[in-house]
């Protein structure tokens, strides 16, 4: 009886950790209170990671398949640059 209860508690703790990491980008048990600016930065950082992944994917496709992915790479590069600038601007406003 104690073993299933312990597994249930462990699963709940892991679920809370995962939820907090996905929503805040920080590994914590209790949800952190983020300001609006901090939430914006976290969202922009998630978008930035996606743009970097698209950029890397375009490079891989060009290398492996010999496909012309220059447009996709250029678009992803522009998005990476735009997001990095937006993050830097928000961080300057926040004083970080």
Image: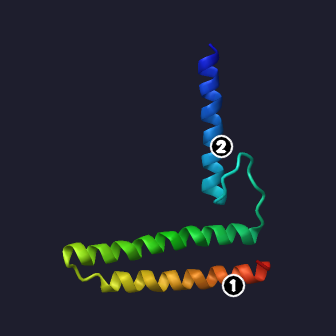
Pick the front one: 76 or 63: 63
Judge the density around disc 1: few (<14), some (14-19), many (≥20) Cα neighbours within 10 Å: few
Q: Which mark is residue 89?
A: 1
Colour style of the rendered protein structure: rainbow
Judge the density around disc 2: few (<14), some (14-19), many (≥20) Cα neighbours within 10 Å: some
Kindly identify the residue that appears in the image at 60 percent across and 55 percent down. Answer: 22
For the C terminus, the quadrant is: bottom right
In the image, residue 32 lies at what x, y percent? 76, 55
Residue occupying the far top of the picture: 1
Q: Which mark is residue 28?
A: none
Residue occupying the far left of the picture: 66
Kindly identify the residue that appears in the image at 55 percent across and 85 percent down. Answer: 82
- Mark 2 falls on what kind of element? helix
Residue identifier under label 2: 16
In the image, residue 63 lies at what x, y percent? 25, 77
In the image, residue 13 lies at what x, y percent? 66, 38
In the image, residue 6 lies at what x, y percent? 64, 24
Q: CA distance from mark 2 to mark 1?
A: 31 Å
> Which callout, 2 or 1, points at the residue further toward the start of the chain?
2
Number of marks in the image? 2
In the rendered view, does 66 fall on the left or right side of 25?
left
Query: In the displayed structure, would residue 49 be above or below residue 4?
Result: below
Question: Could you tell me if the residues under marks 2 and 1 are in contact, i.e. CB atoms within 8 Å?
Answer: no
- Mark 1 falls on what kind of element? helix
In the rendered view, does 12 fall on the left or right side of 37?
left
Q: Quadrant of residue 54?
A: bottom left
For the N terminus, the quadrant is: top right
In the rendered view, does 5 fall on the left or right side of 49?
right
Query: In the displayed structure, would residue 91 be above or below residue 11?
Result: below
């Amino acid at each position: 009886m104690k073993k299933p209860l312990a597994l249930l508690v462990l699963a709940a703790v892991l679920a809370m950790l995962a939820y907090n990491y996905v929503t805040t980008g920080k590994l914590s048990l209790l949800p952190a209170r983020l300001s609006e600016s901090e939430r914006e930065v976290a969202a922009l950082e998630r978008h930035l990671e996606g743009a970097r992944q698209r950029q890397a994917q375009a490079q891989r496709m060009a290398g492996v398949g010999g496909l012309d992915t220059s447009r996709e790479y250029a678009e992803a590069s522009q998005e990476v640059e735009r997001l990095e600038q937006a993050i830097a601007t928000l961080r300057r406003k926040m004083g970080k």
